[in-house]
Image (spheres, helix red, strand yellow):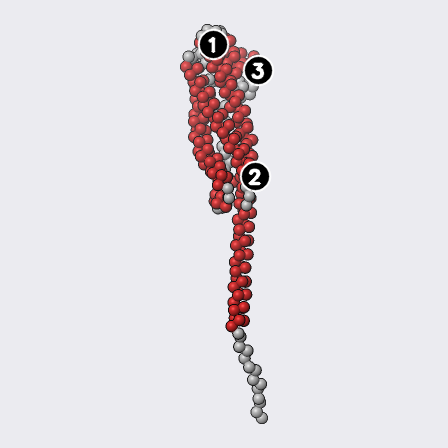
Amino acid sequence: MEVHHAHHPTHKKKWSEYIIEFVMLFAAVTLGFFAENVREHQVVEHKTQQNLESVILDLKKDSILIQERLKEYSKASMMLENLNTLSINYQQSKISKNDFLDSAINISYTLRFGTSFYINNSSYKNTIASGSFSNINSIELKRTISDYYEVYGAKLNDNNRILDDVVEYYNVYTFPVPGGRFGKNKTLDERKFLKDYYIKNNMMNKYLLDKEFLTFNQKAKDRVDIYLRLMETFNQKNTELISLLKNEKF
């Protein structure tokens, strides 16, 4: 017995249906592409924001150290100037040798300088390495960040090296303090004993009482003043950079 299969006519799509399907497919791919771009952009923005917030934290730590250095070098500049005045008065016979030594040694026990300031640039380096730096919108901010870490940072490193040499020469060869400048504070009796010991053994004639001491002391003061000006510049740049970073919009 013959089996007859029903014949179903094949539906032929109209051109309009093909166009609609194409448009829908194209729209889906395009929306997916834009959605991925938006997601990647958000990730980059978030990463940039994290890096710059980390830079702000580093700058705030820098600020604390800068304030400490400003106090240190302001005080050291004043004391070195006092030593200059004492030395001039002694050389001009306005004060006795004993008065000069007493005053100079008393100053020496509180005279401190030589602590170097180093920028904390780890977050800045991460910002550069991750490509976040290029995502910063403000040209002024980019320039200020680069100046702080690259231009002034290089200048700071040079001054740190010079300062180390000056401090070593001054402390070791120019003005050795009886009992040590950075050791435990000495009592008045101990200071007098050490001062008398240094004088008795002609040790002071080689340093404090030498006419060259004024020259060496002035050189140390000049270097301290230069470093003090540098710290004042860093303080200004640090404050300016923190303000710009806080106002940056993404």
Q: Earlier in the sequence, mark 1 or mark 3?
A: 1
The 10 Å Cα crowd at callout 3, few under 14, some 14 to 19, many 20 or more, is: few
- At numbered mark 1, what does the secondary structure look like: helix, strand or loop? helix
Label 1 to label 3: alpha-carbon separation = 27 Å
Give the image location of residue 117, x and y in percent: 50, 30
Task: Indicate which label's residue lies in the foreground, 3 or 2.
Answer: 2
Nearest the eye: 46 or 14? 14
Q: Amino acid at mark 1?
A: Asn
Q: Earlier in the sequence, mark 1 or mark 2?
A: 1
Q: Amino acid at mark 3?
A: Thr
Q: Residue at x 54, y 38 (%)?
A: 244
- At numbered mark 3, what does the secondary structure look like: helix, strand or loop? loop
- 184 shown above or below 57: above
Q: Give the residue number, with chain letter if any, for mark 2.
A: 246
Q: Give the residue number, with chain letter if any, for mark 1.
A: 89
Give the image location of residue 213, x and y in percent: 43, 15
- 182 shown above or below 240: above
Q: Amino acid at mark 2?
A: Lys
Q: Quadrant of residue 57?
A: top right
Task: Indicate which label's residue lies in the foreground, 1 or 3.
Answer: 1
- At numbered mark 2, what does the secondary structure look like: helix, strand or loop? helix
Q: Give the residue number, with chain letter if any, for mark 3.
A: 187
- 97 shown above or below 109: above
Mark 1 vs 3: CB contact within 8 A: no
Label 3 to label 2: alpha-carbon separation = 50 Å
The 10 Å Cα crowd at callout 1, few under 14, some 14 to 19, many 20 or more, is: some
The 10 Å Cα crowd at callout 2, few under 14, some 14 to 19, many 20 or more, is: few
Is any atom of residue 179 visible in this view?
no
Nearest the eye: 179 or 246? 246
Give the image location of residue 16, x and y in percent: 53, 71
Q: Residue at x 46, y 12 (%)?
A: 87
Q: Residue at x 53, y 51 (%)?
A: 41
